Structures are given as C-alpha cells and as structure tokens.
Image (tube, rainbow, N blue to C red):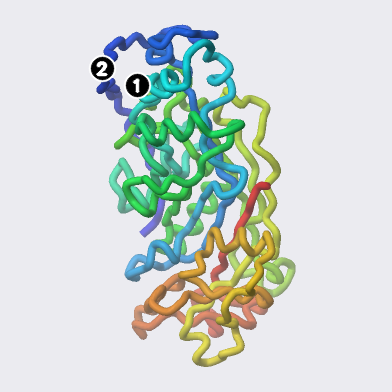
Amino acid sequence: MRSLWKPLTILSFGFALLVVYQNCSSGVPFGTTDNFQSLVDSDEFPYEADFDQVAYMSCSEQQNVNQDYQTFFTFRVGAYNSGGVRVTEAFRNEVIRLNDSAVVTALQRNDFSVGTRLNVAIRTVDNLQLMYINEDSSNDGRSGIDYANLLTTFGDQAFTTELWYREDGKKLNYWPAAQYESEYRMEATLHFSESEQTAVDLRNFLSNRGIIALTFVDEGEIYPKGPGNRSGDSRALAKDVFGMGVSTRFKQPSPAVGSPGGSMPPRVLSSISEVSIDSRRSGQTYGYWSCPSDMYFMIVLPEALDDDPTLCATDQDPTSLSELQKAVRRSLFAEDWYIDWTKKCIVPKEGRSTAGSCYGINSNTQQTHKVNYTTWPAGCGFGHEDGLCPHFASICLRP
C-alpha cells in the first residue's frame, strides 16, 4: 500500500481551563508584570523546544511483517545534547516581583499552555496544520506510527516546577516521571515502511514540500498551536506555529554514485537544514547540522551471517566510545543492534528481528527477500538476479 499525505479537516475545538481561575479572556496583553492573573490569562506562550539528532532507516516491504517497532523505524528524532524544552528567556524577562512559586502556579494554570503536549510529525511546509500519514491510518493518524507525543503534559505540577527552576535556562530532555517508559526521553519514532513505494513517496515528499516538525499540540489533538491561538485549529496558523522544523535531503550510499549501481535508491540522509516555522525565532537557527559518512550503516539480517560470518561483526562495543559513537548509540540502542564500527554495518540482536524484517518477504518462497550485501554497487534491486539493494541507517546531528 502507498503512503500519502492527507489534508486533515481543520476542526474547531474549545479549550477548557480546568482550574480554579476561570477568567477566559483571550487577548490579555503581556508585558513586564507582577500580576499573577495576567500570567494565567496571557497569550504569551512560555515554552520553546528543539531537537538535535535525526536518524533514518530506509526499510520497506513491511506490510506483512511482524516488525519490532523499537528496533526498526523510519525516523527517530531526539533531543540528546543541546536540544530540549525550556521556559523562554522572553517569558522569564517579563516576570518581575512575583515569587517563583507564584510563577509556577501561573504556568500550571495558564489557559494557553496547560494541557499541551510536544508532538513530532511530518508536516506540509506550506500548511503546518496538515500531517503526512500512512494510507491505512485514519485522518487523525496513529500515535507511535504517524506521529509521537513526547514527555508529559504541560501543566503537570512536577514537570512545570522542574522547567521553571532549571538553572541558566538549561533545557530538559528527559522526564522519568512520564506515564509511559517510551516517553521518558524527548524522542520520537515514526514508521513509514509498508512498501518500497511508501519509502519512495516519503522521500519525494520530504525533498519537495515536507518537513519534520516538533510542535505543541493540545492533549489528544494533532493541530499545532501558534501565536494568539489557544488551540491549533486555525488556518491562520498555516505557516507560523510554536516549535521547530527541518527539511531533509537524501542520496545514494557510497559507492553507488557514479558507478554501475545507479539502481541503488537514495537511501541515506545527505543533509538537514532548519526551516523557520516559529516567528518568535525569526532569522535565528539552533545551529549547523552535519551528516557524517561515519554515521551511515548497512542493515544486515542475522541469517546472512550463516552464509558469510565475516559479512558484519557482532562483537560488543569498545569499552570506551568516541563522541560520534555515543551519538550513534543514542539512535541505535545497544539492546537492539550489534554495530561493526569498521565495516559500517549493523545486525539486529537475538529476538529483535523476524522473517522479512526491513527487507520484506518473497511471496513465492515465503522467505526474506534475497539481498545483495556485497556486490550491490554493480547492480541490485527487485528482479535483479543478485538480490535487493541493501537498506541503510543514517544519522545527522547538531552540536
């Protein structure tokens, strides 16, 4: 089945303030203040967030495969180093003569931000209210597949307290009090791997009009919030929402470029660049992204090692990892993958893969498709006598 973006119906919905303070004025001007109620009623959005690492796997043909959604993914987006979420400097600078506990309480009750979640999804750059989803998903998409919510709900007392009291504007990217273990880290995984056409369509979409976006949405909703709008359901927010977006580009893994292996699809990330989606940061970026070739890894299934044990080593990691290797392990978990750091390949660990993982099942043999792991630069693909082109994992990061 093919993956496609669906223009979601923009639904108008109310945002109820479930707290003691019931003043629902939506246009309170926000300036330097010592007034508690002005913080509760304010349209000044107090948070900003960003991520600093993107991993991509080109796996496809998974429609009939019982895949492990932690081990195999299409995108894994995370804040591990410089990224995270925090109270904006502008908000901190505007608050005077209010003690810290009063500010925390106001943040918990602010009817613009309470009940909000961080959300990662692929969106249309010219209308950020539209989300790219799998063809078999409902219009609202599927959590953990088409989109992911991170950490916990803004307004949670402990979470809000931690954000406000962090020293020197330090960002938060880990919250072990989250409801689910998968939400502890500020990290999202998305899955678009039903077929090879699904993978091709996604790369084409991202290369032309799509971005990976980290935004703020109401709990249970998928529409990003933006300036002056208490819930992300307005077409006025098509190009200006709170958050961060990046565009991605892809290329063939070396040595396919310029070789007879031109049949190899563009299966690794070549570059990432920030796209301005938040007018609060107009003209600013979070930093330069790099996609080192040392962070491209061929995906080798365990059964291939039965025929050639030297194809990819399955040794334990070195005792001491370089900074680049540590970054790789943030996206490719040690419990899931062996990494051959010399040959630049990865093998799923025992119990992490099944018949057809990443490569799909041959309908004639009911076995995993034959894969050309060794001579693919000379030619590979569906129908090629030597087998499919190998899939890759690639990672880009920002200091």
User: Which quadrant: the N terminus?
Assistant: bottom left
Left or right of 339, for residue 353: left
Give coordinates of residue 183: x percent, y percent.
Answer: 39, 49
Q: Are marks 1 and 2 in contact (CB under 8 Å)?
A: yes
Left or right of 25, for residue 213: right
Q: Is residue 273 at least partly visible in the picture?
A: yes
Left or right of 243, for residue 138: left
Give coordinates of residue 138: x percent, y percent.
Answer: 28, 46
Q: Residues within 10 Å of mark 2 (few under 14, many from 20)?
A: few
Q: Residues within 10 Å of mark 1 (few under 14, many from 20)?
A: many
Look at mark 1 in the image and give the residue it sits on: 109
Between 267 and 30, the residue placed more toward the observer is 30
Give coordinates of residue 179: x percent, y percent.
Answer: 32, 47
Between 142 and 114, the residue placed more toward the observer is 114
Amino acid marked by disc 1: Arg
Left or right of 33, for residue 247: right
* Disc with the residue nearer the chain's start (1 vs 2): 2
Look at mark 2 in the image and give the residue it sits on: 20
Relative height, residue 168 to residue 91 (above, below): below
User: In 3D space, how far apart are the residues under numbered discs 1 and 2 (Cα atoms)?
Assistant: 8 Å
Q: Quadrant of residue 389?
A: bottom right
Residue at x 43%, y 31% (from the top left corner): 161
Residue at x 33%, y 70% (from the top left corner): 66
Element assignment for label 2: loop
Element assignment for label 1: helix
Relative height, residue 239 to residue 389 (above, below): above
Query: Residue reaching furthest right?
Result: 258
